[in-house]
Amino acid sequence: MNKEKRKQQILHVLAKTVRRLMESENLDYEKLQEIRLRTGQPLLIVWRGKEIFLPSGKKNKHIVTQEEIRETLEYSSHYSLYAYENEIRQGFLTIEGGHRVGVAGKVILEKNKVKNIQYISSINIRMSHEILGCADQVFPFISENKQILHTLIISPPCCGKTTLIRDLVRQISDGNQYVKGCAVGVVDERSELGGCYLGVAQNRMGSRTDILDCCPKAEGMMMLIRSMSPQVIAVDEIGTEEDIRAIEYAMQCGCKMIASIHGLSMEEAKKKPILGEVIQRKRFERYVVLGSETHPGVLKEIYDERGSLLCRGC
């Protein structure tokens, strides 16, 4: 994406006073990760992994007002929060470029389910990042005979699993030296993989990829199998028994699976109540473990279906 376009996509949704502060900073927007607005608290950004209160280099920091929260929400939703109600109830909305505007405030319940979020007091704008080619190093280990193997990515939060899945999907869809291009179905429950805006993926997901945006994972996998005939299905952050059962069903239908789960190690994954049974039954053929010892997205280990180590540090 053009750097200037990325910058304008971000500045466009900010309250005018916040926008002017951002423009006064000498920032590389490619390295900008988050902008955090909390009512009554200093304006904070995360840039190159470091927290910076704005304006930087000055003693008096800018304190975010409720009016700035309201104005930012209006710009983000094109003055129609109601139109984004389904997204808001999940705690975020997606803007042009695939960037995600997370919100926090008073939760309104209906029949013990989140109906809406009102009196929003916090906003976290998370930048969408693509790293084309970041999956190159894992393909030799997770493919055979020009086909992808059932693969589970195990990773702590903020260690690059979503970025890795996105690049895996793109390359599997288009094809490369290790896999033949094929139909890929993506269930993007939180709009993080495709970063869809008005139904169109803002991230490069490949020429044979179909995306169900803002759809529950288990239900979405069933819908894709019935309607889109995918050869590969990709989902991010599985965790419930329903997710696991849907994955097993998809495998039985002949679909190859790419999925991820939060975890620190292969040993920890084996101890998870539901996932541990799946590992024992050798449903997944490869396990890719990520870490952050030196920087986010470090490839630590890859295991086969028996739990045998194939590579370390790769």
Image: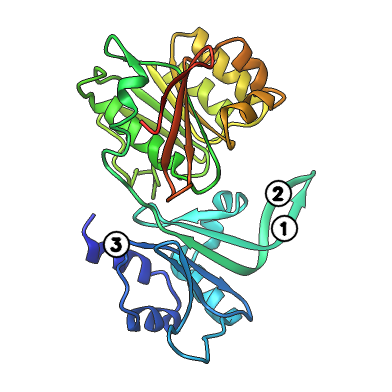
Residue 107: mark = 1
266 displayed left or right of 145: right
From the viewer's side, name the closer residue of 106 and 48. 48
Q: Crowdedness of circle 3 by 10 Å Cα count: few (<14), some, many (20+)?
A: some
Q: Crowdedness of circle 2 by 10 Å Cα count: few (<14), some, many (20+)?
A: some
Residue at 50 percent of width and 35 percent of height = 236
From the viewer's side, name the closer residue of 259 and 277. 277
Q: Is residue 161 above or below residue 55?
A: above
Q: CA distance from mark 1 to mark 3?
A: 31 Å
Q: Amino acid at mark 1?
A: Val
Question: In the rendered image, which residue does mark 2 sit on?
Answer: 114
* Colour mapping used in the image: rainbow
Q: Amino acid at mark 2?
A: Val
| Callout 2 secondary element | strand
Q: Is residue 180 above or below residue 253?
A: below
From the viewer's side, name the closer residue of 198 and 295. 295
